[in-house]
Amino acid sequence: MVARYPIRTGKVVEIIVWLAVASPDIDIYHLVKAAFYADKYHLNKYGRPVAGDDYQADTYGPLGQCIYRLLTNDPIEMLALGGNGVLPFKLGDRWRVIADREANTRILSASDVEALRRGLDVVEPHTFDELVEMTHEEGAYIAADGGRMKYEDMLDEDDPQRDEKAADLAETARFAVL
C-alpha cells in the first residue's frame, strides 16, 4: 500500500497565492519546488503534507501535478475548483507568478504557513540549475525512477521511526483531512 492523499485543489490555489505574495519575484519553477520542500518539511514534522499533491519525478526534479496544472491553467484542474471563477494569480514576464490578492489563511493552518516559509527558505537562494541538482539528489526522486514519487520515501532517512511512520502514512493517508 502506498500513501495517497486526497488533493484539495482549493488549498493548492491558496498555497500558490501565499508563496507568490511572500516572494513577489518568484518564478513558476521556484514556486513548485518551494511547495515540494514545504510538503516534505510538514510531512516529517507534523505527519502530513500541506496539500497532498501527487509528485512526479520529472526531468527538472519533483513536480507537483496539481500545482503545476493550476499554474498552467489546465482545464481539468479548473473544473476541479467547481467553477469558482478566475484564478487569483497569473504568470508575468520571465514566468513570474503574480498574486492578485493575499492568501486565505483560514484555509492554511499555522503549521502550513510555517512549512511554506521553510520551503521558500530552501529554494530562494538557489538558481534553476542548483535546484535541479539539489532535487535530483532527493531520495524520493531517485526511488521514483521517473515515475510517481512516494510520500513514504520523503521521510527523513535518519529517522529511527521511519518504517513505522511510512506504514502509518500508507494506511491513513487516504482518510487525511488536509
Image: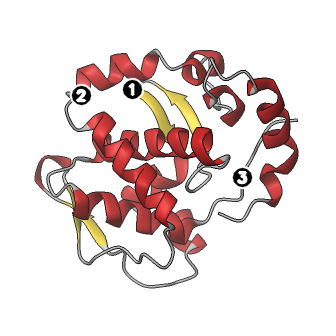
Residue for badge 2: 128
**Mark 2 Cα-neighbour bin, 10 Å: few <14, some 14–19, many ≥20:** few
Q: Under tag 1, what secondary structure? A: loop
Indicate whether 120 appears above or below 175. above
Q: Earlier in the sequence, mark 2 or mark 1?
A: 1
The percent position of residue 9, horizontal first and vertical second, equals 56, 66
Amino acid at pointer 2: Phe
The percent position of residue 174, horizontal first and vertical second, equals 81, 54
The percent position of residue 54, horizontal first and vertical second, equals 61, 45
Indicate whether 129 appears above or below 85. above
Q: Is residue 35 shown left or right of residue 155? A: left
Residue for badge 3: 5
Q: Marks 2 and 3, how far apart in space? A: 28 Å
Residue for badge 1: 60
Name the residue rendered at 77%, 41% in the picture: 3
Q: Marks 1 and 3, how far apart in space? A: 23 Å
Indicate whether 154 appears above or below 105. above
